[in-house]
Image: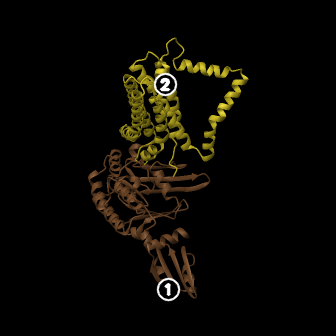
Amino acid sequence: MSIIEIKNVSKNFNNTNALKNISLTLEPNKIYGLLGRNGAGKTTLLNIITNKLFANSGEILIDGETVVENDNAQVKIFHVAQKNIYTVNMKVKEGIKWTQEFYPNFNKNYAYELAAKFKLHTDKKIKDLSTGYYSIFTLILGLASGASVILFDEPILGLDANNRELFYRELITNYSEQPKTIVISTHLIDEIADVLEEIIIIKKGELVLAQPVDKVMLMGYTVSGDCTNVEKYTLGKNIIREETMGRLKTTTIFENRDRNDKEQIKELDLEITPVKLQDLIISLTNS
Amino acid sequence: MNNILTATKYQLWTFKYQSLLCLSIIAVNILISVTVTYLFPGSGISAGSSDLVTFIWIFFVGLLASTPSFKFMLGNAVSRKSIFWANIFSMAILSVAWAVTITLVLSFISKLGIKILALYPLLYKNSNFVSSVVWFIGVFYLLIVIGWLINMAYYRSSKRMAYAISFAPFILSGLLTIINQSTHGKLFESIIGFLVTALGFSGTIPNPYIGSFSMLLFAGIICAFNYLLIRKAQIKD
């Protein structure tokens, strides 16, 4: 059970501000979705948490200890990264063996069980695995790591629908048997939506949102109806998307609704529909 | 400390394949030398230099093995400080292992009655097993940490800086030549004088222990630079 505190973290690459003053807390035993467009800064944040990059300012603590150059802190975190870090000659079984050496709580039997379920040949060289099977290999290491925090960066890259479903199932089983903090950075939001408890949205290096999924889903809604009425209702509200077809206007709003809003919607004869999480994220990261 | 031990074990494991490769080169070298010696007895043909092969090989181990291991270990919760110490220890173990191996190989070749073309017996006559091992430890450790230094220097550099590093030896040697000419050869004279003393050639009998000590001292200085380079190294891709 570990808590990660991210305090005012900024990161620059030459003249690019990859992360701008990010502050958030990852509470123990929750599943987070780290969402945002390509280049938003998600991977940079995960790399700073795992000591692969240094922040220009701010600090990150795990259970009150800094994550920077701290072996004791880092062993609590497992990063399922996109980039291949394994040497050219290393076989899958050797990858499993060495991960066990570095992570004392690693469950080797469980790793082999998962390899059998995903039909991953452990005698194969890692460099010879397809993109999908490389993802499976790293997912297995993450699930079996025994770390109290697992960071998945694009975990389902190249996975077919069957393997994706198997992964979600294994993830939930793993989480329910051994609760831990899980962060999943992905673009396939709809697929993962049911698994997530909280979402964190990063846009151009800035933290846009960090809220429980159900709260986010309540805040996001679409009103449609006569153009004038929609405009009247949405005046002063946080509009994240607008579409007009003739006299019909559809507007997506992202803010809490009170009783007055509900009455106004009724009065103006507007139709209200919930928004899918993926659409909401697209709107939030585009607006 | 536990992480340093595991990282050292990992680093030694990565050296395993490379060591096997070098051993096979030496074995082939011996085989060819034996065949040639027995086919053409009295021809005076010497066995190819097994120690020079190892010098080149160990330099490339330092040069090529550092970055992949750095990425792997950083990706497995090992801090840069632990990676640094793991490299120091694993490279030391590799140097000792190879110093013993190459000394045994040279003595084996000599026992086969094959003329050896090797640097160590050429430089230090009247040496024994211990002095040979000690001297090779110094050479191997120095070469492997130089390879590591070059690797880290390139890894930390921008493209422009990498070009500067590539051209630096040429510019430096040119500058030294100019300075040497302007000092009427005194610069090179003092450099050679320093090397002669540092490598243990100043006495009547060359001393491999002094040579080894000087090389290990120099390796220590290089390791300090390696620490400065690794402590702020970040993943690039």
Residue at disc 1, secondary structure: loop
* Residue A244 vertical placement versus A113 (above, below): below
Relative depth, front residue between A63 and A51: A51
Subunit bearing disc 2: B
Most extreme residue toward the top, as rendered?
Answer: B204
Please tell me the colour of chain A. brown
Query: Is label 1 or label 2 in front?
Result: 2
Residue B119 is marked as 2
Relative depth, front residue between A82 and A116: A116
* Residue B84 vertical placement versus A122 (above, below): above
Q: Position of residue A202 (x, y in %)?
A: 51, 62
Q: Which chain is yellow?
A: B
In the rendered image, which residue does mark 1 sit on? A270
Amino acid carrying label 2: it is Leu
Q: Position of residue A8 (x, y in %)?
A: 52, 53
Q: Position of residue A107 (x, y in %)?
A: 29, 51
**Crowd band around label 1 with a 10 angstrom C-alpha radius: few (<14), some (14–19), many (20+):** many
Residue at disc 2, secondary structure: helix
